[in-house]
Amino acid sequence: MLVFDNVSKVYAGGKRAVDHLNLEIEEGEFVCLIGPSGCGKTTTMKMINRLVRPTEGKILLNGENLLDKNVVELRRSIGYVIQQIGLFPHMTIRDNIALVPRLKGMPAEERNGRAEELMELVNMPKEFLDRYPHELSGGQQQRIGVLRALASDPPLILMDEPFGALDPITRDSLQAEFKHLQQTLGKTIIFVTHDMDEALKLADKVVIMRAGKIVQVGSPDEILRNPADEFVEDFIGKERLAQARQQLQTVGQIMNPDPVSVGMGETLSQAVKIMRRRRVDSLLVTDGAGVFRGWVTVEMIERHKNWDAAVADIMETDVPTVRADTLLRDATRNILVRGLKYVPVVDDRKHLAGILTRTSLVDVLYDSVWGDAEDESSGMADGEGA
Amino acid sequence: MDSIGNFFSEYGALLFEKTWEHLFISFAALALGVIVAVPLGILLVRLPKIAGLIMGIAGVVQTFPSLAILAFFIPLLGIGKVPAIVALFLYSMLPILRNTYIGVKNVDPNLLEASRGMGMTAFQRTTRVELPLAVPVIMAGIRMTAVYLIGWATLASFIGGGGLGDFIFDGLNLFRPDLIIGGAVPVTLLAILLDWILGKLEKAATPLGIRLERGEA
């Protein structure tokens, strides 16, 4: 939808605010431009509605060069929300919201209907339409600021740190509300922020900038998983990265890859021998091909008495498993909710790949709280379970 | 009380005529001042490089002794109402210009950025954002100027412009305190009345939202 093709902005005095920038933005994408102050993120955004004119390169909107368009028409077709809200104090909320439709010549009645419709969208009472901006709280004002940008139903909306001046609680609720709104309406959003939490929360695509250049582009998960360089790591912050690493860790990364298992054809006496040798109270059962079939515990064997029977005859087959590529956070919930001591881990062909025990989870927890001071392989000891 | 009655029976018609002249000179100068200084003030905000220079010149003009200005226009425009109006117009420029300039310049730049970003033309930005928001300051300048002009217009009498100054200066020349008072009291009353009327106008011209914001409505 929007393409930056080798775009630069050089200010008088030679400061390169944006330096040979290339970026492609898809329709319906929520893009956050983020970086330290002076990195060129706001300049980049303002080139889209031509508040700033690029020095070199071109910006294409749906294939058309922005500079070939009528600047007033262009701006009226792009929503714009600024940090300081910028509601006109001499206009009622109604007039503020309906400003762009009015500039475009929409008749008064239609404008009015549109304003009411938008108020409903954010669950604000219609009586507010006849009030003036100063009569509203900061959060309410910025809701109106967002509605004003939506008024003429533009496919693209530019937002310059719109929630930056709000208190944290209001900011949180507005972020959630706006993300929902964006998904419902399918708008393309270019959102400038310096708040990494905000970017990770809202964006489909995060564009990290530094000194006029793009350092990294990716989804929040990609950026958290593979920060491009030290700058990005620092910018995201060690704490957030550690947290994210834990959140994005898969079961396969922390499982014990060497579970104590037994073939389903083996006899119970052999099973007991294995248990004794490895000092465990249960065994995972696999078939000849290594496919996980169930488990057998020392109590089950004791109850059965006939030690010549095959493991397959008494094993418990209705056993929860977890796949190695599951995110740890999802698996953890599973284990905790069901009160399991351990979960067998299987790969995509149901082959036994390892075992996830409470001990391994505790290790992860320790790591994230106290760092990697202890030997990582302690998970192998397996105090409980197989 | 009798003497006041006598004064009116003798000078009533003349007083009315001179008051009318006085108002005419003042309003003509004020109207010219508004017509020239308000647009110029808006323009100067757009031309920050020469704004300082123009404001400086207007400030210097303001320091010229008013009698000297009036006298200065005699060789150029002769005597009568025209040179008086031109001279007073020059005086009215500075306060109106300064207030317009400050009023427009102090409009929140975020609002201008928002209006630009939303696709207002330069003309729309001026008429729909800058002027409504600057109206209180511009109107205060006009009001102050109007009151000054009523006072200054007495000097028009010196160059044959007429007005209530005629009473005052005749009174001075003829040692007739009744004429001096008969001229000075109407000037004062006019000034007070005009201040009050323009105060109302200032309020009416200020957008409701701004008045509410200041808690004035």
Image (cartoon, grey):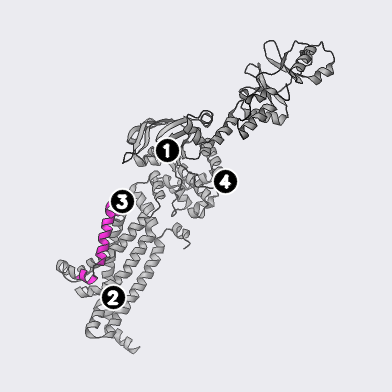
- Assess disc 1: are there few (<14), some (14-19) or many (≥20) residues with their C-alpha within 10 Å of its C-alpha: many
For disc 2, the neighbor class at 10 Å (few under 14, some 14 to 19, many from 20) is many
Q: Position of residue A87 (x, y in %)?
A: 45, 50
Residue A169: give its label.
Answer: 4
Q: Which residue is mark 2?
A: B19
Q: Are marks 3 and 4 in contact (CB under 8 Å)?
A: no
Can residue B171 be seen at all in this image of the molecule? yes
**Circles 2, 4 touching at the beta carbon (< 8 Å):** no
User: Is residue A67 toward the left or the right of residue A218 in the image?
Assistant: left
Determine whether the residue tagged by mark 4 lies in a helix, strand or loop.
Answer: helix
Which amino acid lies under the numbered mark 2 shown in the image of this protein? Thr
Q: Chain of mark 4?
A: A
Mark 1 → mark 4, Cα distance in angstroms: 25 Å
Taking the magenta stretch, the answer to whether it contains residue A357 is no
Is residue A37 positioned above or below B133 on the image? above
Mark 2 or 1, closer to the camera: 1
